[in-house]
Image: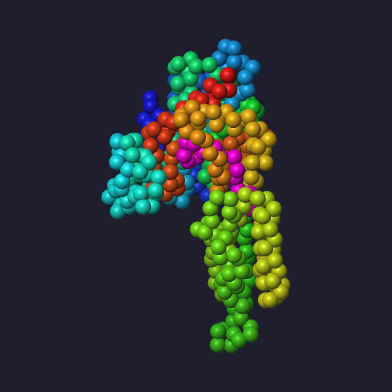
Amino acid sequence: MTALERFIHYVKIHTASAEDTNCTPSTQRQFDLSRVLEREMKEMGMQEVFVDEHAYVYGFLEATPGCENKPSIGFVAHLDTVPDFSGENVQPQIIENYDGGEVKLGTSGRVLSPADFPHLPALKGQTLITTDGTTVLGADDKAGVAAIMTACETLIRENRPHGRIAVCFTPDEEIGHGASLLDLDRFGVDFAYTVDGGELEEINYETFNAASARWEIEGYNIHPGSAKNKMINACLVAMEINAMLPAGDTPAHTEGHEGFFHLTDMSGTVEKASLSYIIRDHDAQRLAARKDTLRHIEALINDKYGAGTVKLSMHDQYRNMAEIVLEHPEILRLAEAAIRGLGKEPKAEPVRGGTDGAQLSFRGLPCPNLGTGGYAFHGPYEHATAEGIEGAAQIVLGIAAENVK
């Protein structure tokens, strides 16, 4: 089975995760893909294939003769798709010998255009896979799943030399829980890679430092006819809080290593209101300064309107995995050599988010991220190429080969 055939099969399996659940996996439908992968892994000859009660799928390739003392490598990708845009009834469009121009996405009225996605002309001549405009595609991260599965099948079929290789496919990455229950003792590797990125030449080892913030605002409601110098409108206080943040420090105005405050949710009446933010910065000290800014605003508002008007709560979510990965440069060198083997020059790109690899790195398993050849994740414009997914498989194979040199 080719990487493309696998990919098309996987994306048609509905696996969206769900927010605000207290179980893993957050949706039982993720088991549908777990079981498919379990069967395929057993059929291709992987050892100790296992699906646990949380939908994690494990499989292993023991080292070939003479490579038993080489480092053991893990490869990780996630099963779920993003919960906030439909991943059900995915109908991929396959466009062979793509001309580099606009593509109508089914009958949705949406168009995939080089005007919005300037990289598209560089994909000319490849086999482009898009959505029909009504769902996500699922390249995030079923392209990674397909690449890893294809690489493992190739290692077995062609009897290529390799050290011990462990594979794990995780649930709930899109809601931040993907690596939290991965059994590191069962996995048993020296280092790992998530295959969950964009362009093939990218290596990601920097993530945001991340925190969340929530404001609870108590207003004072009184008849508007007699409200002068008495009413405190909680909604207006919420607007005042947001106006005190730097207007340019939002996701829509930042890129690269630039951090932000992101208002994700707001609700309210005159009497009560709430605001929810995520706070991001690649630099830990700058993240701390952003949190201090919020505390300062809390003090100012309470001083202005009275103690207890606002209550701020903040929680740290994850840290920049560069702290861990850069202590192990040999892991990056293996990936760089594999990417050069495709005729591409590797480039380090900061992740403007988090990865399973960030959690794993801080659990003691260094784990940078590799590209899958997918683009425009988390929406109807998501797309990938057959050549990109196959290229990701070749990078996995290249890492395995470099590891035993």
244 sits left or right of 383 in the view: right
Find residue 277 and report its image quarter.
Answer: bottom right
Q: Which residues are magenta?
A: 197-211
Q: Is residue 203 magenta?
A: yes
Q: How many marks?
A: 0
Q: Residue placed at 49% from the left, 44% from the top? A: 17
The residue located at (38%, 25%) in the rendering is 1
Q: For residue 66, say whether it is visible.
A: yes
| Residue 65, picture quadrant | top right
> How far across and how far down the image is residue 49, in percent?
53, 24
Q: Quadrant of residue 131?
A: top left
Residue sitting farthest toward the left:
107
283 up-or-down from 306: above or below: above
Colour style of the rendered protein structure: rainbow
Report if residue 176 lies within the magenta region: no
Q: Position of residue 364 (x, y in %)?
A: 68, 34
**Viewport quadrant of the C terminus:** top right
* 393 lies left or right of 100: right
Please state the horizontal and vertical placement of residue 287, each as a whole percent of the image: 66, 54
Eyeballing the image, is 217 above or below 146? Answer: below
Vertical arrangement, residue 398 with respect to residue 350, above or below: above
One can see residue 34 in this view: no
Rendered residue at 47%/41% (across/down): 198
Question: What residue is rendered at 70% in x and 61% in y?
Answer: 292
- Percent position of residue 284, x then y: 68, 50
